[in-house]
Image (cartoon, rainbow, N blue to C red):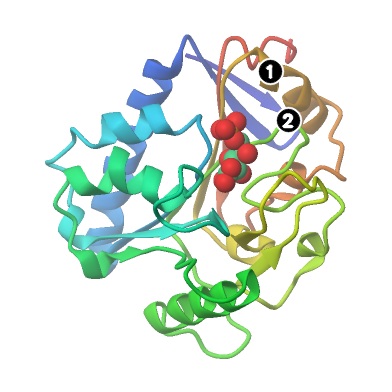
Amino acid sequence: MNKMTFKDNDILIFRDSNEISDYIIEKWAETAEREIGRKNEFTVALSGGSTPVHVYRNLASQTSLPWEKTHVFMVDERFVPYDSDGNNFRMINESLLLHVGIPARNVHPIITSNNSARDCAANYENDIISFFKLSPGAFPNIDLVLLGIGQDGHTASLFPGTASLSERSHLAVAVTPLKESQKDRITITFPVINNASNVMFLATGESKAGILRKIIKMKNRNLPAAMVKPLNGTAVFLVDADAGSLLD
Ligand code: 6PG
């Protein structure tokens, strides 16, 4: 693994997805042990998409991790039913959660069976407020947030050109991506992401090289992924050699 620091971003370049997955499992175990020692629970928010599936499958074999004290939240969800192929929670459930014996009460999906994405976002926000016992205007401090990066620079479901980018009070919002082909989404907001302790971006493959260069080298602040700046935490980019190929 090669470590690069570019301005205020740490980028770790790994040989392949296996190396990235090993690194994430190591950091997950480390952070879980520390946080459970500190507050008897470990909170993590997971992204959908295709890139993290490999990591989730490898995590699923880590049955010695403290799943009974781990709480899993969702970074975002597509406004589609659970049994649809595009449902992020279904993917995370089938590739990870159903294999590790985590108590059902520790799993916090974004329920999509409500009438609108807006109602789903409101319900999810209430779940986060009650779990973290938040007072009005406060944001949760999630221990570890795993984010992806889209080729348009979106992260979570915070898409370029959408109102979700300037949301400063809600914890979760509904998003209508500009691309008509894309379903409505529900996503956590920047104040939640930027209040997390550890943020890890995961990007692999040549198709992500161009956008990574824009985010990291050209610091294009209009790109949602470049707007992730944890206040009291860290954000690190975990990329493979192909995705990092334009970061010389
Ligand atoms: C989603 C994600 C989204 C994803 C990026 C990257 O619901 O799709 O949460 O933010 O991380 O689109 O997706 P890939 O990993 O499939 O490239």
Query: Could you say where residue 128 lies in the image, as x and y percent from the top left?
Result: 46, 75
Q: Which residue is mark 1?
A: 207
Quick check: can you spot residue 40? no
Q: Give the quadrant of the C terminus.
A: top right
Q: Residue at x 39, y 52 (%)?
A: 83
Q: Is residue 93 above or below residue 52?
A: below
Q: Quadrant of ligand 1?
A: top right
Query: Could you say where residue 34 lies in the image, as x and y percent from the top left?
Result: 28, 53
Report crowding for label 2: few under 14, some 14 to 19, many 20 or more residues within 10 A (C-alpha).
few
- Between discs 2 and 1, the one toward the N terminus: 2
Q: Nearer the viewer, residue 168 or 206?
A: 206
Which type of secondary structure does the marked residue at label 2 adopt? loop
Q: Is mark 2 within 8 Å of ligand 1?
A: yes
Query: Could you say where residue 219 lies in the image, as x and y percent from the top left?
Result: 84, 35
Q: Residue at x 61, y 26 (%)?
A: 11
Relative placement, left or right, of 29 versus 155 is: left
Q: Are marks 2 and 1 in contact (CB under 8 Å)?
A: yes
Query: Disc 1 residue type?
Result: Ser
